[in-house]
Image: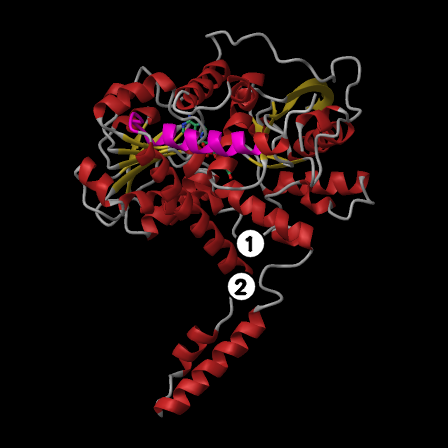
Amino acid sequence: MSSSTRKAAPKSVSGTNSRKSLPPPPTKETMGARFYESVNKYFDRAAAFTKHDKGILEQIRACNMILEVKFPARIGGEIKVITAWRAEHSHHKLPCKGGIRYSEDADVYEVMALAALMTYKCAVVNVPFGGGKGAIKVDPRKLTVEELERITRRYTVELIHKNCIGASIDVPAPDYGSGQREMAWIADTYMSYRPDDINALGCVTGKPVGQGGVRGRTEATGRGLYFGVREALSDPELTKRLRITPGLADKTVIVQGFGNVGYHAALFLQEGGATITGVIEWDGAVWNPKGIDVRELAAYRSETGSITGFPKAKTIKNGSSVLEYPCDILVPAALESQIHIGNAERIQAKIIAEGANGPVTSNAEEILLKKGVFLIPDMYLNAGGVIVSYFEWLKNLSHVRFGLMDKRFEEQMNSRIISTIEKLTGQSLGEFERKLIIRGPEEEDLVNSGLEETMVSAYHEIMEVWHQHKGVKDMRTAAFISAINKIAQAYSLLGIFP
Ligand code: NAD
């Protein structure tokens, strides 16, 4: 569907809650503006390797719609005006898809940059969505649960009134500062306003399993990151170039941000054989070259409210300095622009595995590439969340749990095959082996296997594009070229309407 179809929807209202034309060009002062510039710079660099019409490239790059709303909320007994956004970067495929960030530092450029990244990310991993993103300019840590709930529900109502949410329109998900709880409030609010929408549950993903969520969604981004890093480390060409041994076994890892993405990435990398030597949070870092047990650190944080002071590691007050400590793999999984022109030269990691969106500025990237650091880009590496969100959306639209129809059938078939083999060979399997082989897939098995397949095949697709373009020097550019080609093809199929 083209963006013109969406424009026909009666959404504009007068006053502050209105659709606005794009804001003036970004100033250098704000982080969001720099992030937005970085994303566009990456796009332009990749677009130069393609042969698409200039107008098509401009259309792909442009943010199709940006909504800014302001609404009142009672916070600590006072009425405060809350600013929030929803950006739909591309309507070349619908629905749009992208998380909602709860952050005091959010601004319109950050939202547009994140929405653009979602468009490219979905294209890279072949998830059939356009890119979107939302933000509510609040610090959830300073709000009570009741205040957060009121703000989330009011934001949802704004999206409903402006036709910016729905299973076929725009489907939010969790992002920095939000999680299952917020997604459940959004789904509940939407359903109460749209009782006649049979696909109402598909209006948002990242919901709790009991409220239409899918098993495996919470850990999906970290798990996907693990699959991507594992694939890179089994790439003989790459490991030879970086002069490292293949596999995770002897690798040291530093993770910045111990939230959803960072915690799960650290956990799966550790389970895959890597040693987590450093974890960085906003209030400090912990460091132990012999390794930090991820579950123990999480349990300590749950108890004390902070990772600092963890008895089995050294606490470093200036947390961000640990980004510059030696390690094989650095996983920035907190926020954008964490590796910048001011610290890029001192980064010692051989691989930067981008868990967060936009953690490396484009200027820093130039320095890192010159130093021979290999960057696995966000638009590929943190796509696990949107991949499993896609599965959740499919589950909501099909109104049936994955595995329900075939689990028992598969188990019966497996049982018959084993009985036949036992009869033919005259040998019997033990009870444990029999159970292991017969077992049909649970929903989580299917989700994780779909995630693995998508991440692994996308890695090889990007590498193939890289091999096909001689002058390309980095994986990000290859991923962007892959995304641009797919979106341009979608536009050529849609046609340009007069
Ligand atoms: P989260 O809120 O669960 O976790 C973020 C963590 O980073 C928190 O523990 C926070 O305290 C910490 N943090 C904040 N500022 C920091 C600083 N200056 N230094 C170190 N740590 C800091 O958020 P999340 O969902 O894990 O998202 C993290 C990043 O990953 C964001 O860029 C987000 O856009 C991106 N991302 C998230 C998902 C997802 O499924 N949640 C998917 C793709 C990308």
Q: Within the magenta stretch, is there residue 335? A: no
Given residues 5 and 217, the one toward you in this image is 5
Q: Within the magenta stretch, is there residue 481? A: yes
Q: Is mark 2 within 8 Å of ligand 1?
A: no
- Residue under pointer 1: 215
Q: Is residue 280 above or below residue 28?
A: below
Instruction: Residue at 34%, 32% (x, y): give it.
Output: 475
Residue 324 is situated, as x and y percent measured from the top left of the image, at 26, 26
Circles 1 and 2, Cβ within 8 Å, touching? The answer is yes
In the rendered structure, the answer to whether residue 202 lies left or right of residue 233 reads right
**Number of other residues with Cα within 10 Å of mark 2, as a class: few under 14, some 14 to 19, many 20 or more:** some
Q: Quadrant of residue 498?
A: top right
Q: Quadrant of residue 173?
A: top right
Colouring used for the render: secondary structure
Given residues 305 and 422, the one toward you in this image is 422
Residue 85 is situated, as x and y percent measured from the top left of the image, at 64, 23
Residue 159 is situated, as x and y percent measured from the top left of the image, at 72, 29
Residue type indicated by callout 2: Glu
Residue type indicated by callout 1: Arg
Residue at the left extreme?
A: 243
Let me know if residue 238 appears in the view. yes
Asked which secondary structure carries label 2, the reply is loop
In the rendered structure, the answer to whether residue 377 lies left or right of residue 33 reads left
Give the total number of marks visible in the rendering: 2
The residues colored magenta run: 470-490
Residue 203 is situated, as x and y percent measured from the top left of the image, at 69, 41
Q: Which mark is residue 278?
A: none
Which image quarter holds the N terminus?
top right
Q: Main secondary structure of the magenta part?
A: helix
Residue at the right extreme?
A: 196
Asked which secondary structure carries label 1, the reply is loop
- Residue under pointer 2: 442
